[in-house]
Image: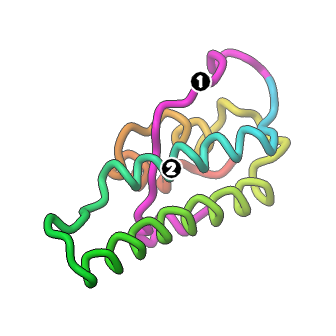
Amino acid sequence: MRWIARGAPLVLLGLALPPSGCARSVTESDCKAVGEHLHALWTAEAKFPDAASPSAEKAVAVVKSEGQRLEESFVTDCKRDLVGKPRASGEFSCLSHAKTLADVRTCATIPAH
């Protein structure tokens, strides 16, 4: 998940996660929820063209596809690296609660557990 450290733009939106005091492990469903959260943050902070034109339509398609690609990349990495680890630990907890892309980038500095 160090791809965050390379400055990859990501997306996050509020998640309906149980309180962090719950002692349960990350599941594939959790990975998907955080991936959707990241995608939503990306979409919320992405810059879309103001005027309609053929090039603007292409730009919008690229921005949307990049958000989808980042979501899919996170889910793949999460399944590989975080499934089975405690939800309240390190990077997963940080990403789950991030409110902005800047917060997401900060999560890259959380030590692996």
Q: Residue furthest bottom?
A: 55
Which span of residues is magenta-colored?
A: 1-23
Image height check: is 37 above or below 61? above
Residue at point 67% right, 15% down?
21
Image height check: is 62 above or below 88? below
Q: Which residue is mark 2?
A: 38
Residue at point 69% right, 46% down?
32
* Principal secondary structure, stretch drawn in magenta: loop
Q: Quadrant of residue 103?
A: top left
Say whether residue 18 is left or right of residue 107. right
Q: Amino acid at mark 2?
A: Leu
Residue 73 among magenta residues: no
Say whether residue 94 is left or right of residue 60. right
Q: Position of residue 22 (x, y in %)?
A: 73, 17
Q: Which residue is mark 1?
A: 16
Disc 1 is placed on an element classified as loop
Q: Position of residue 77 (x, y in %)?
A: 70, 62
Mark 1 Cα-neighbour bin, 10 Å: few <14, some 14–19, many ≥20: few
Residue at point 26% right, 84% down?
55
Q: CA distance from mark 1 to mark 2?
A: 14 Å
Image height check: is 13 above or below 76? above
Pick the residue in front: 36 or 74.
36
In which quadrant of the rendered image does the N terminus lie? bottom right
